[in-house]
Image (cartoon, rainbow, N blue to C red):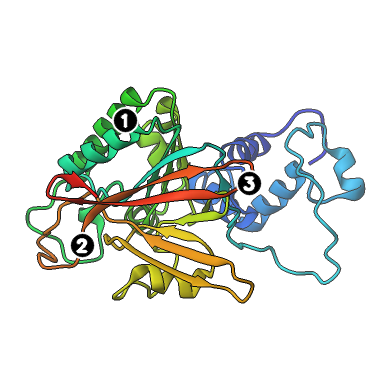
């Protein structure tokens, strides 16, 4: 593969590496082979070319590569010949703003408009400099594995409802940092694409952030169940903790995290605190939702409307949390 001019195959491989820089060599080779059957005949041939283009061969072989722009940093030695790791990146996302509104479980297009208005008005009153959309902003009913209601809306309607909401949110909070941490309902979209259309699930044009034009709206998206850190407080959607909920979601969350934590997901306001041996008090909270209260799949429940506000000392990490309920059109 030495030479001054890259071959057609090398050009194809290079374009795929640029487009999908985070995909493993094996997954990328599979994708290239599936989409370019006339140019490539074997998977191993493509993997060899990927290693060549990215400089993974090391040593003398890398000297033959003229264009080293796609070379990847040298990895630590692997004397034990360990296979490539596919471990998830769980690095927390840290927020440095000081006045933070946290809303979750809007479930568009089944949202509660009155409750959302009350929550956002409260954010304006507090002059928030950050809004966290803590998961399940959209519902994705039609691609759920659960039984679907005959009243469910189309995917197109759901996308349009969320687009309208996000545009309005940015309009009313033009300078506010907005972060969207994906919940289990948003994850339905990626799982749907992976199961039903694996050939396109990793194509950028079908990613939520592209479909909803989050870049234009300057809304950051947090994927892969990564936690959000607000000083000494960790924010999770709640689906990261399997088998939780129960009578007191905050108490159940405490048993898993053993740290100051705020979760949504359970559609119920609850709190729990316990002192440690060294007299540090751990505080855990779950927030209410901003969606319909009596859905057809569970018309009788123990949900409540609500949201949270955090006043954060960005120097010490200390915080004051207001876990608000909305009852009959009033905030408590």
Q: Say which residue label 2 marks.
A: 303
224 w.r.t. 62: above or below: below
Residue lying farthest to the left in this orientation: 150
For marks 3 and 1, the one nearer the N-term is 1
Q: Is residue 111 visible?
A: no
Q: Is residue 294 visible?
A: yes
Packing grade of label 3 (10 A; few <14, some 14-19, many >=20) is: few
Horizontal side of 76 relative to 111 (left or right) equals: right
Q: Say which residue label 1 marks.
A: 169
- Measuring 91% from the left and 49% from the top, which residue is drawn there? 59
Q: Say which residue label 3 marks.
A: 316
Measured in 3D between alpha carbons, the distance from the residue under mark 3 to the one under mark 2, in whole angstroms, is 34 Å
Mark 2 and mark 1 in contact? Answer it, CB < 8 Å: no
211 w.r.t. 254: above or below: above
Nearer the observer, disc 3 or disc 1?
A: 3
Horizontal side of 114 relative to 125 (left or right) equals: left
Indicate the position of residue 155 as horizontal and vertical percent values: 22, 45
- Measuring 14% from the left and 47% from the top, which residue is drawn there? 153
For marks 2 and 1, the one nearer the N-term is 1
């Amino acid at each position: 593969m030495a030479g001054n001019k890259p071959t057609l195959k090398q050009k194809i491989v290079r374009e795929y590496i640029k487009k999908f820089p985070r995909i493993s060599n094996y997954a990328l080779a599979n994708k290239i082979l599936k989409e370019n059957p006339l140019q490539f005949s074997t998977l191993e041939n493509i993997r060899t070319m990927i290693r060549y283009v990215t400089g993974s061969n090391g040593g003398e072989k890398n000297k033959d590569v003229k264009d080293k722009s796609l070379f990847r940093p040298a990895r630590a030695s692997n004397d034990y010949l360990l296979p490539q790791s596919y471990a998830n990146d769980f690095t927390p996302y840290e927020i440095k703003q000081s006045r933070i509104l946290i809303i979750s479980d809007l479930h568009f297009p089944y949202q509660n408009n009155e409750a959302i208005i009350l929550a956002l008005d409260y954010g304006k009153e507090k002059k928030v400099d950050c809004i966290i959309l803590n998961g399940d902003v959209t519902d994705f009913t039609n691609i759920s594995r659960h039984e679907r209601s005959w009243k469910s809306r189309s995917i197109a309607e759901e996308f349009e409802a969320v687009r309208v909401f996000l545009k309005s949110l940015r309009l009313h909070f033009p300078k506010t940092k907005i972060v969207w941490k994906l919940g289990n309902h948003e994850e339905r979209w990626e799982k749907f694409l992976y199961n039903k259309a694996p050939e396109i699930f990793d194509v950028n044009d079908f990613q939520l952030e592209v479909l909803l034009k989050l870049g234009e709206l300057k809304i950051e998206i947090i994927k892969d169940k990564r936690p959000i850190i607000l000083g000494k407080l960790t924010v999770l959607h709640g689906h990261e903790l399997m088998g939780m909920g129960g009578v007191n979601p905050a108490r159940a969350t405490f048993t898993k995290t053993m740290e100051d934590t705020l979760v949504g997901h359970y559609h119920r306001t609850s709190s729990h605190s316990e002192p440690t041996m060294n007299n540090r008090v751990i505080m855990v909270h779950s927030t209410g939702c901003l969606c319909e209260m009596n859905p057809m799949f569970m018309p009788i429940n123990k949900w409540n409307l609500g949201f949270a506000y955090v006043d954060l000392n960005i120097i010490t990490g200390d915080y004051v949390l207001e876990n608000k309920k909305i009852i009959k059109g009033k905030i408590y």
